[in-house]
Amino acid sequence: MGKRKRIATLLSSYSSATGVTIYLINLIKHFNAFEDASKPELIVFYSNDSPIDDVKKIGYPYIEYINSDKRQFILWRIFKRLIRVVFKKEINNYVKADFVYPALETEKFSLIKTKIFWKEDFQECYLPENFTKEDISYTESFFKLLADNPDYHLVLSSESSRNDLFKFYGNIKNPIHILRFVSLIPELQPEKTPAVLKQYNIDARYFIVCNQFWPHKNHITVIEAVAILRQQGYEDFKVVFTGKTSSHRNKEYFPSLQKRIDELGISKQFIVTGFLQREDQLLMMQNSLAVVQPSLFEGWSTVIEDAKALNKYVIAADLDVNIEQMTENVSFFGRLNADELALQMKKVLIDPPVVKEKDYKQNIQKFRNDLADLFQLS
């Protein structure tokens, strides 16, 4: 057997980078499903608030954990300096690996031959108001880094993102890969559903919106659509909002939504659960009338992938990426058009759609093949 490939990665926290953290944990689960000979060695850098226990539960056999907490690195720098002064020797903390993904331009990764960067989406090009000057400056530095290093690889999540890349940054010379991630659904226990619904006081049929409360997630259009339905006499349903209610991009976002709901007099139509355990959220999705994905921007929606894996009907904003991602069991609405969303919701209320069952295992296998190609594991 040949030498195992070594892949370095950095695990953030659910609070600082929810989507990225879930994405990386998912990657490790996929690697764990490979034949033993193809499984790479993983070097996982983590901080004290990283969900390292969630990674350990996977039981991946070839993995090394390195605590990269700032306090740990301060002590390391002090130790290095002491060794340099007393023993006149240098100690480096370079990581030896074949790949780093998603790559960061840091000293410890400098000797890794193949750096694979990941760009989730190009939201800052369309909705710059959601970003700070520092965010925009970081993105500009990121693409300058790629331009200066044409051997660095770039992973995108969709053809839509590739189109945006060429639109805003021209025909860059770096190798580009499209890696459309898929969801891994744990074995669910439907018998737990009544208890989960009771816990969150869900006592009626409902639509579910599984988005963090960030400005671009577009909860307001859902709220306005519900108000329209109420005016038309449709009251025997609720909308369940899941996800963190805080946003570093706009601390007033969630309070503004609450205020609008109160102004419209429709508070009884909504249930806000906050951040959920994954199994609870999936059971709620499975039991819902439909999953609503109103976001104004996505790279590749985890919510839509979950819905596809569960064979659930989706009502989605008419983003190019959503249309690319889901071609069946879905209806689309103008992303800022509450009337169109209300119409699609009303259709589901009156005549629930018959979902065409799809074998999601094919999607999973395609993703694993792409993953093996990216890291040269086959």
Image (cartoon, rainbow, N blue to C red):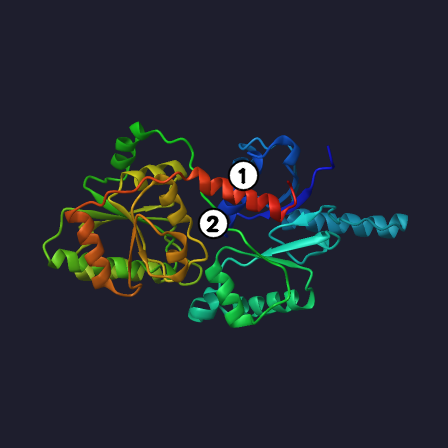
Q: Look at the image and tell me in which quarter the C terminus lies.
A: top right
Q: Position of residue 320 (x, y in %)?
A: 39, 61
Q: Look at the image and tell me in which quarter the N terminus lies.
A: top right
Q: Position of residue 284 (x, y in %)?
A: 30, 40
Left or right, 361 with reference to 285: right
Camera-side residue of 58 and 79:
58
Q: Secondary structure at mark 1?
A: helix
Q: Residue at x 25, y 47 (%)?
A: 207
Q: Position of residue 313 (x, y in %)?
A: 29, 46
Category of crowding for the residue at label 2, using alpha-carbon neighbours closer than 10 angstroms: few (below 14), some (14–19), many (at least 20): few
Category of crowding for the residue at label 1, using alpha-carbon neighbours closer than 10 angstroms: few (below 14), some (14–19), many (at least 20): some
Q: Residue at x 48, y 59 (%)?
A: 159
Q: Residue furthest right?
A: 88
Tag of residue 167:
none
- In the image, which is nearer the foreground, mark 1 or mark 2? 1
State the residue position of label 1.
30
- Where residue 220 sits, quadrant-wise, is bottom left
Q: Are marks 1 and 2 in contact (CB under 8 Å)?
A: no
State the residue position of label 2.
18
Camera-side residue of 138 and 253:
138
Q: Can the viewer see residue 46? A: no
Q: Position of residue 123 (x, y in %)?
A: 45, 65
Q: Work out whether 238 lies above or below 125.
A: above
Number of marks in the image?
Answer: 2
- First along the sequence among labels 1 and 2: 2
Amino acid at pointer 2: Thr
Amino acid at pointer 1: His
Q: Work out whether 83 lies above or below 194.
A: below
